């Protein structure tokens, strides 16, 4: 871009954006997009089947400051797969950073003890699977430290992308994974969350094995709706 070999490109790494903005021969246009870097949970993982654990993980992580440190000072936090645009809902529950709430939820659910919490002799431990995308290792390291303060042990399993695809999307051998999801200006998230796509074994399917009849019905209705008002 700086050499003039190309005229237009997309930049996502903060360092590249900063370098481009410092070049008088280049013009940088910033915009919010429906690309999100999200943690997806395997609903068949025994520890993740505990709703209190899932909510405690969300409350224990300071996503706002972690994103600004690991991704970019201009990064924003999303609270659902669709966080901006006409299809974004203002009514999505927000699990804000609240470490005391995280601890309280775990205590009430029977996860107790000093250090790493336990329940019925089982330590509160899970594995986060990532591949070395530009921000994933730093995000994972930050998550690990936040969760440790709540008594949750998170191990990091970093794989090359080809192995990541096989283990996560085909074999579903994960507790939680980090990856990008993008939905464009006319978002359709159905394939990522429908019960019927759970066994397809691809990036565009539902490796989390999430299943909710009400969500299935809403997504199927949105797929045939004719107006944005009906689909939103």
Image: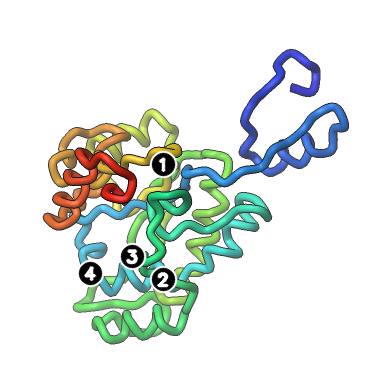
- Of pointers 3 and 1, the one earlier in the residue sequence: 3
> Which type of secondary structure does the marked residue at label 2 adopt?
loop
> Which type of secondary structure does the marked residue at label 1 adopt?
strand
Please rate how many residues cluster around mark 3, counting C-alpha atoms within 10 Å: few if below 14, some from 14 to 19, many from 20: some
Q: Residue furthest right?
A: 24
The answer to whether marks 3 and 2 mark residues whose Cβ atoms lie closer than 8 Å is no
Q: Residue 95: which disc?
A: 2
Tell me how far mark 3 sits from mark 2, CA to CA.
Answer: 21 Å
Query: To which residue does mark 1 refer?
Result: 181
Q: Is residue 94 above or below residue 38?
A: below
Please rate how many residues cluster around mark 4, counting C-alpha atoms within 10 Å: few if below 14, some from 14 to 19, many from 20: few
Tell me how far mark 3 sits from mark 1, CA to CA.
Answer: 26 Å
Query: To which residue does mark 4 refer?
Result: 50
**Residue depth check, mark 1 versus mark 4: number of the one nearer the observer:** 1
Residue 144 relative to residue 18: left or right: left
Q: Position of residue 146 (x, y in %)?
A: 50, 69
Q: Nearer the viewer, residue 114 or 231?
A: 231
- Of pointers 1 and 4, the one earlier in the residue sequence: 4
Tell me how far mark 2 sits from mark 1, CA to CA.
Answer: 20 Å
**Which quarter of the image is occupied by the N terminus?**
top right
For image coordinates 15% across by 37% down, the residue present is 199
Tell me how far mark 1 sits from mark 4, CA to CA.
Answer: 25 Å
Query: To which residue does mark 3 refer?
Result: 125
> Which type of secondary structure does the marked residue at label 4 adopt?
loop
The answer to whether marks 1 and 4 mark residues whose Cβ atoms lie closer than 8 Å is no
Q: Position of residue 182 (x, y in %)?
A: 43, 39
**Residue depth check, mark 4 versus mark 3: number of the one nearer the observer:** 4
For image coordinates 77% across by 32% down, the residue present is 27
**Residue depth check, mark 3 versus mark 1: number of the one nearer the observer:** 1
């Amino acid at each position: 871009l700086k050499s003039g070999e190309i005229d237009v490109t997309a930049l996502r790494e903060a360092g590249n954006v900063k370098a481009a903005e410092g070049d008088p021969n280049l013009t940088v246009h910033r915009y919010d997009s429906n690309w999100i870097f999200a943690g997806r949970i395997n609903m068949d993982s025994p520890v993740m089947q505990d709703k209190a654990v899932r909510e405690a993980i969300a409350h224990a992580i300071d996503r706002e400051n972690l994103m600004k440190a690991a991704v970019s000072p201009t990064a924003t936090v999303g609270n659902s797969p669709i966080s901006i645009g006409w299809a974004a809902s203002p009514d999505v529950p927000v699990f804000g950073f609240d470490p005391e709430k995280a601890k309280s939820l775990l205590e009430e659910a029977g996860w107790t003890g000093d250090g790493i919490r336990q329940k019925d002799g089982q330590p509160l431990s899970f594995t986060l699977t990532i591949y070395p995308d530009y921000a994933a290792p730093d995000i994972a390291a930050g998550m690990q430290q936040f969760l440790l303060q709540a008594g949750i042990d998170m191990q990091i399993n970093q794989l090359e992308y080809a192995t990541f695809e096989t283990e996560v999307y085909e074999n579903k051998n994960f507790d939680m994974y980090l990856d990008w999801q993008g939905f464009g200006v006319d978002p359709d998230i159905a394939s990522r969350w429908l019960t019927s796509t759970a066994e397809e074994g691809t990036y565009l399917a539902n490796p989390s094995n999430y299943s909710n009849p009400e969500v299935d019905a809403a997504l199927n209705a949105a797929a045939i709706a004719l107006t944005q008002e009906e689909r939103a």
